[in-house]
Structures are given as C-alpha cells and as structure tokens.
Amino acid sequence: MRVKMGRKVAGGARLVTIGSARYAVDAHTLRQLEVIPVAA
C-alpha cells in the first residue's frame, strides 16, 4: 500500500493519502510515527 505525505494544513497538521483515502494528521501524531522510506 502506498502512503503519500501531502501539504501542511492549519495547526501544523499534514494531509496523508493512503490508497484512495485522505486524512489530516496532527503534528503531535506525526512525530509519533516511524517512517521507513523505500525506493519507488
């Protein structure tokens, strides 16, 4: 499954796209996530 980090929105949140769904994830939650980049 592909996860894409989008632009920043109000309050430091960021748009995150997972498949066809989009979520606004707040700055505190983003800092808690472990991100492992992979080659496209």
Image (cartoon, grey):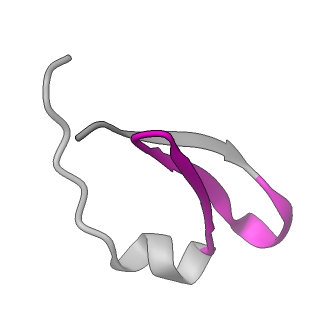
Q: In the picture provided, is 24 more to the left or to the right than 32?
A: right
Q: Residue 34 or 4: which is nearer the viewer?
A: 4
Which percent across, then down, holds residue 4? 44, 38
Q: Is residue 12 magenta?
A: yes
Q: In the picture provided, is 3 more to the left or to the right than 7?
A: left
The residue shown at (20%, 17%) is 40
Which percent across, then down, holds residue 15? 63, 51
Q: In the picture provided, is 4 more to the left or to the right than 35?
A: right
Q: Is residue 28 magenta?
A: no
The residue shown at (49%, 40%) is 20
Q: Residue 33 or 3: which is nearer the viewer?
A: 3
Number of disc labels: 0
Which percent across, then down, holds residue 5? 50, 43
Q: Is residue 16 above or below residue 7?
A: below
Taking the view exactly as shown, the residue that stands out farthest to the front is 20
Which percent across, then down, holds residue 11? 81, 72
Q: Residue 18 or 14: which is nearer the viewer?
A: 18
The residue shown at (23%, 41%) is 1
Q: In the picture provided, is 16 more to the left or to the right than 38?
A: right
Q: Which residues are magenta?
A: 9-26
Q: Residue 31 or 16: which is nearer the viewer?
A: 16
Taking the view exactly as shown, the residue that stands out farthest to the top is 40
